[in-house]
Image: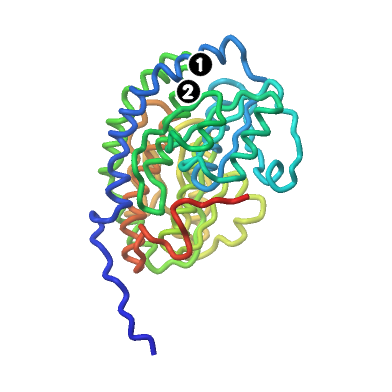
Amino acid sequence: MNDAVAPALPAATDTLMYREAQQTADVVAAQFARNRDIIGHLAEDLRRNPPLFVATCARGSSDHAATYAKYLFETQLGVVTASISPSVGSVYNIKQNMKGALFIVISQSGKSPDLLRNAEAAADAGARVVALVNVEDSPLAALADVVIPLGAGPENSVAATKSYLCSLSALLQLAAHWKNDDSLLAALDALPDALRAAWQSDWTSLTDGLVDAHNLFVLGRGLGLAAAQEAALKFKETCGLHAEAYSSAEVKHGPMALVGPGFPVLCFAQPDETEQGTLALAREFRQRGAEVWVSAEHGDPASRPGQDLALVHAPHPACAPLLTIQSFYKAINALALRRGFNPDVPPHLNKVTETV
């Protein structure tokens, strides 16, 4: 018999995850100020010498940021953007034609061997390498042509929060300056206050509804898909809850066969051209008897009582995924504790993960 006593769980407001996520608005404001010149010069160069395409390379939460980059650059700049598989360069050791490409590597630590090998190979193949990295003296930073510091500061919880959102905000600042778009540039100024408001959103109904859940879908589309991917990862790593992220279009191609009475679904309705399709899918799943929570800036009149999750107004639709996840982080921290997990120390995981 094991007589070991499990360590007591902290209060919700005492976890590292809570405290670090709560800092996001301040670190994003500081990041924008600090990186304005770096990104401004890079944006000028990209306008003078446009890349043929953008390739992204990342793992984990950083790869979800790469998903955001894809939709951000393609919708705002019309530049084809694709995520490469790190194993092609690191395990298969295949040389790829990167001439004329902008190669963006996103990493918190800047140490993972597969990312380093791909960045080096991309540079050798003729790409401009830009590193978004939190550790500025990392090996990845040394390889890059341009380093955009995330500036998230120390992050000790295994679950990434502010570093993930700082990755998104850095990409947003780059897109705004590259496009030189007044509405996007103005949104940068408004984003920190919007993040503060998002942190105050009450998603208790989601926490209450998933305490005993075993599986769920998290749905988003377009710019909102990255938020769905990040949320699904956090359910798994902090709550021991199996969650799968899908596009609200892709889920129709097979996976939605699982959705029936009592099946939990979390929908992130992005406030743009994809919104109505996501809300229509939420209605369809409710008609099947599923438990459906919806986060939508304009609300969802069809939601059941308590399942309409508040989403603060986004200064630009491209900001909405950041606000969605900021509200979500507060809720997932509480849910982890309700389910008996300490979100700061998920089982079998380390803060820095190095893969080849």
Q: Quadrant of residue 112?
A: top right
Give the position of the N terminus as an image quadrant. Answer: bottom left
Q: Does residue 289 appear in the picture of this structure?
A: no
- Residue type at mark 1 is Ala
Q: Does residue 183 appear in the picture of this structure?
A: yes
Q: Earlier in the sequence, mark 2 or mark 1?
A: 1
Residue at image position (36%, 53%) is 157
Establish if 204 lies above or below 315: below
Residue 43: numbered disc: 1
Seen from the viewer's position, the closer of residues 261 and 233 is 233
- Pointer 1 local density, CA inside 10 Å: few below 14, some 14–19, many at least 20: many
Mark 1 lies on a secondary structure that is helix
Mark 2 lies on a secondary structure that is helix
Please indicate whether residue 107 sits to the left or right of residue 333 in the image.
right
Q: Position of residue 332 (x, y in %)?
A: 36, 55
- Residue type at mark 2 is Leu
Q: Position of residue 143 (x, y in %)?
A: 56, 31
Q: Quadrant of residue 122?
A: top right
Residue 174: numbered disc: 2
Seen from the viewer's position, the closer of residues 25 and 139 is 139
Residue at image position (54%, 40%) is 221
Q: Are marks 2 and 1 in contact (CB under 8 Å)?
A: yes
Residue at image position (34%, 32%) is 28
Q: Position of residue 151 (x, y in %)?
A: 37, 33
In the current view of this chain or complex, which residue is farthest to the bottom? 1
* Colour treatment of the image: rainbow
Residue at image position (69%, 28%) is 124
Establish if 354 lies above or below 175: below
- Pointer 2 local density, CA inside 10 Å: few below 14, some 14–19, many at least 20: many
